[in-house]
């Protein structure tokens, strides 16, 4: 077989996952002017953009404008989108071998890490990922239920996702009505009885993972005051020493913002309160299988410096109990193993080196298989962090192509893949289908003064397309 990458013999690439990393990967590949290439992007869901559509908070519309660049990429004549096509069900790794020279997995980190404490699985205790997917209109989660009749909720974790959850729980109906939140979530949250939301961090203010805009935003909501206990807002000696040595301006500003909330709550007519706690960890959830969560036991922590110089929490002998009826854990995420793809169970990522998938037995790269994004390195960074990550993998793909290390598909013609997909998943969605749905969503939203009104059901999407 001749070397792929020429006009007569284009390089055929399959991208599994149509989130930001998938599109960054496609964009990097398209920039290779001396390479003739055809790229097919597959996603389990009918709609593209992954985390941007189903993970970014609905009140963060500016972040979602990145999809304009993704749309330009997807509209390139040598790029095709196959939505509602699930890897492992509708198309397998063996199937892809028959059609592509290179296959890259960009499926993200779809499951959550558990706290590992008694009572964690009681009714009323949820992964934050489920709540986020629910209010963002993910088809798999549209029928989930959350007991918003409770008055006290707790969010375990101090990353940006935890802040998003706390904020959405505390927004007024009028604030939420200006967003693209799912209509059923808007209805449910409009009747929420939640008055107090606790955000719990196991380390101190200087180690909080949320960004400065996120913590600043908590102090700018219409009907919620934020409060930080003064003793927990102060830096412990270990943190103060480390921060002084690093002189990290971003972290210094973060601590400054946090400490500005460590003052008596002013007497206002705001009906909700956010309480940001530090150096505490849940050790048990109380409640019953029939009544759900009723309370939480916390242990107070202190920080110590490891040999590597990182600051880690260590539990003390101080405990407290807190009544709470709804709990969301946001303590980390992990990837989901894909059928036939080597996986590192302890890290929750595809086994790889710089994006090259590694055979666990030989410890050598598997020809033609690659990965990028959170499923490659774990859940770290923001959306833009995946751009250089994808570039690292694409660089490896191009090196391997030049060295003659690639798959030799029996049916590299685009029509062969299309025929296969039509046979195994006749209800697949093209990018043209998505553009029609996008236009309908935006038009429906405009009549309500909202950015868009999302489709949250695949059957409704098919009906809207006349199928």
Image (spheres, rainbow, N blue to C red):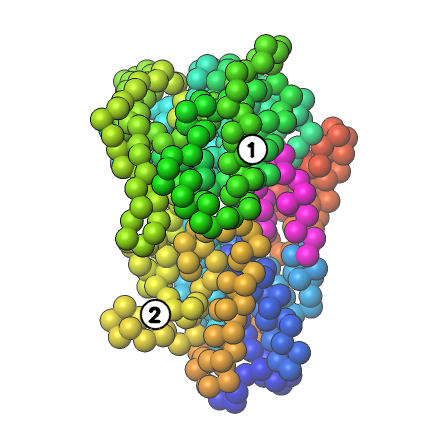
Evaluate if marks 1 and 2 touch, with contact meaning CB atoms under 8 Å apart: no
Label whose residue precedes the other's in the sequence (1 or 2): 1
Front residue of 388/348: it is 388
Q: Nearer the viewer, residue 445 or 306?
A: 306
Q: Secondary structure at mark 2?
A: strand
> Neighbour class for label 1 at 10 Å: few (<14), some, many (≥20)?
some
Residue 358 disc label: 2
The foreground one among 400 and 320 is 320
Residue found 35% across the figure and 49% down from its top:
310
Would residue 235 be found to the left or right of residue 346 on screen? right
The residue that mark 1 highlights is 257
How far, Cα to Cα, is label 1 from label 2?
Answer: 44 Å
Q: Position of residue 178 (x, y in %)?
A: 69, 29
* Res 132 seen here: no
Image point (47%, 66%), residue name: 104
- Residue 60 lies in the magenta stretch: yes
Relative to 431, say whether 369 is above or below.
Answer: below
* Magenta stretch in the rendered image: 45-69
Q: Nearer the viewer, mark 1 or mark 2?
A: 1
Residue 34: % across, % down: 64, 82
Q: Give the residue furthest to the left.
A: 317
Question: In percent of the image, x 54 and y 67: which residue is there?
Answer: 391
**Picture coordinates of residue 45 (x, y %)?**
53, 49
Rendered view: 153 above or below 46: above
Question: Front-most of 351 and 224?
Answer: 224
Task: Indicate the position of residue 341 as horizontal and vertical percent values.
Answer: 35, 63
The image quarter containing residue 234 is: top left
Residue located at (37% from left, 66% from top): 352
Q: Is residue 24 magenta?
A: no
Residue 73 seen anywhere in this rendered image of the structure: yes
């Amino acid at each position: 077989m001749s070397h792929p990458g020429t006009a007569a013999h284009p390089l055929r690439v399959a991208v599994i996952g149509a989130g930001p990393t998938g599109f960054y990967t496609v964009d990097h590949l398209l920039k290779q002017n001396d390479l003739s290439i055809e790229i097919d992007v597959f996603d389990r869901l009918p709609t593209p953009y992954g985390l941007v559509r189903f993970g970014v908070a609905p009140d963060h519309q500016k972040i979602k404008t990145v999809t304009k660049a993704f749309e330009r990429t997807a509209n390139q004549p040598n790029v095709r989108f196959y939505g509602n096509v699930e890897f492992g069900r509708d198309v397998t790794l063996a199937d892809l071998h028959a059609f592509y020279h290179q296959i890259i997995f960009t499926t993200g980190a779809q499951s959550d890490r558990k706290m590992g404490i008694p009572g964690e699985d009681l009714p009323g205790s949820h992964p934050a990922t489920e709540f986020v997917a629910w209010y963002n209109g993910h088809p798999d989660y549209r029928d989930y239920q959350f007991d918003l009749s409770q008055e006290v909720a707790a969010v375990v974790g101090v990353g940006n996702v935890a802040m998003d959850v706390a904020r959405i729980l505390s927004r007024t109906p009028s604030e939420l009505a200006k967003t693209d939140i799912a209509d059923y979530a808007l209805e449910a949250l409009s009747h929420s009885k939640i008055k107090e939301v606790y955000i719990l961090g196991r380390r101190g203010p200087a180690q909080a993972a949320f960004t400065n805009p996120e913590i600043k935003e908590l102090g700018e909501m219409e009907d919620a005051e934020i409060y930080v206990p003064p003793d927990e807002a102060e830096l412990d000696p270990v943190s103060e020493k480390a921060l002084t040595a690093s002189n990290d301006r971003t972290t210094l500003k973060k601590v400054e913002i946090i400490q500005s909330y460590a003052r008596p709550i002013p007497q206002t007519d705001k009906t909700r309160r956010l309480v940001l706690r530090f150096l505490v960890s849940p050790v048990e959830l109380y409640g019953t299988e029939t009544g759900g969560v009723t309370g939480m036991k916390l242990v107070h922590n202190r920080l110590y410096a490891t040999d590597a110089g990182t600051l880690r929490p260590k539990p003390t002998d101080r405990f407290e109990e807190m009544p709470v009826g709804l709990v969301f854990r946001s303590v980390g995420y992990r990837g989901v193993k894909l059928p036939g793809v080597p996986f590192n169970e302890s890290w929750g990522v595809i086994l790889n080196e710089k994006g090259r998938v590694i055979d666990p037995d030989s410890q050598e790269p598997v020809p033609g298989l690659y990965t990028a994004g959170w499923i490659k390195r774990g859940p770290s960074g923001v959306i833009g962090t995946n751009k250089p990550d994808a570039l690292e993998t694409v660089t490896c793909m191009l090196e391997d192509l030049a060295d003659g290390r690639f798959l030799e598909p029996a049916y590299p013609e685009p029509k062969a893949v299309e025929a296969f997909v039509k046979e195994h998943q006749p209800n697949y969605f093209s990018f043209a289908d998505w553009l029609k749905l996008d236009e309908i969503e935006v038009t429906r939203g405009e009549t309500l003064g909202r950015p868009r009104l999302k489709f949250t059901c695949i059957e409704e999407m098919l009906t809207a397309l006349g199928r």
